[in-house]
Image (cartoon, coloured by chain):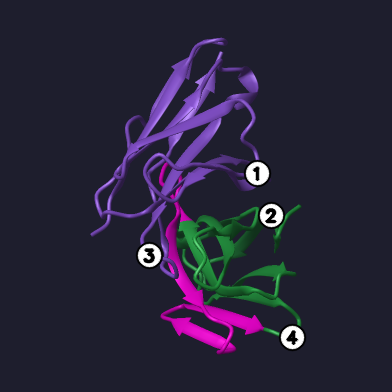
Chain colours: A green, B purple
Amino acid sequence: QQQVKQSPQSLIVQKGGISIINCAYENTAFDYFPWYQQFPGKGPALLIAIRPDVSEKKEGRFTISFNKSAKQFSLHIMDSQPGDSATYFCAARVAWGNQFYFGTGTSLTVIP
Amino acid sequence: DVKVTQSSRYLVKRTGEKVFLECVQDMDHENMFWYRQDPGLGLRLIYFSYDVKMKEKGDIPEGYSVSREKKERFSLILESASTNQTSMYLCASIGRPDTEAFFGQGTRLTVV
């Protein structure tokens, strides 16, 4: 059973456009929601993360929007660049837990 | 800077062989994890360990075993490799609870 559901599976965006990836969860014990970015041939690396006490977090061109009541969170990439082409994973973890639950990943391609 | 190092980037093994995948982390982390990554399925947890000589099954442990004799090293063992174990294998580590996961660069295993 997938604890974190992610969509879309793949996404193609023009350079300069906005990329949006969505995730949903059911477990209300989740307390930490990171996004990981993975380039081909590399392991995932933390991109940005949010806790449920805030509705939005922004770091440069990357923004997480969090809707606690709907149990959904999303990653927005503004002014998408070809260098953003990668696979993105959302994840969730219970408070003070040691196990992450990952979404199925989104392959983003930004075309020039 | 945390480093999680997997011993091989690419491996090709024959069906029935015993395969060892090694992972070493240099930050004294208690928790270590093995995932396999397949297109459309995301990251699936095989086994994890929260202490030396301790191990817990993840979501897909069948056909795999693990060993953690030292805190910094977590090994994944395929007792008798099969073609359906062809995949990307990722090792990760987490320090104290409530911190992020750090991934190795991955091992792409092909079983022929």
Q: Residue at x 46, y 72 (%)?
A: A48
Question: What subunit carries mark 1?
Answer: B
Q: Is A106 part of what is drawn in magenta?
A: no
Q: Residue at x 65, y 74 (%)?
A: A29
Checking the image for residue A23, the label placed there is none
Q: Residue at x 61, y 35 (%)?
A: B61
Inspect the image, locate mark 3, and give the three-letter code of the amino acid beneath it: Arg
Residue to which mark 4 is pinned: A69
Inspect the image, locate mark 2, and give the three-letter code of the amino acid beneath it: Gln
Residue to which mark 3 is pinned: B96
Residue B98 horizontal side relative to residue A32, left or right: left
Residue to which mark 1 is pinned: B59
Inspect the image, locate mark 1, and give the three-letter code of the amino acid beneath it: Asp
Magenta part of the protein: which range? A38-67
Q: Residue at x 48, y 15 (%)?
A: B18
Q: Element at badge 1? A: loop
Instruction: Quote the CA–CA distance across marks 3 and 1.
Output: 22 Å
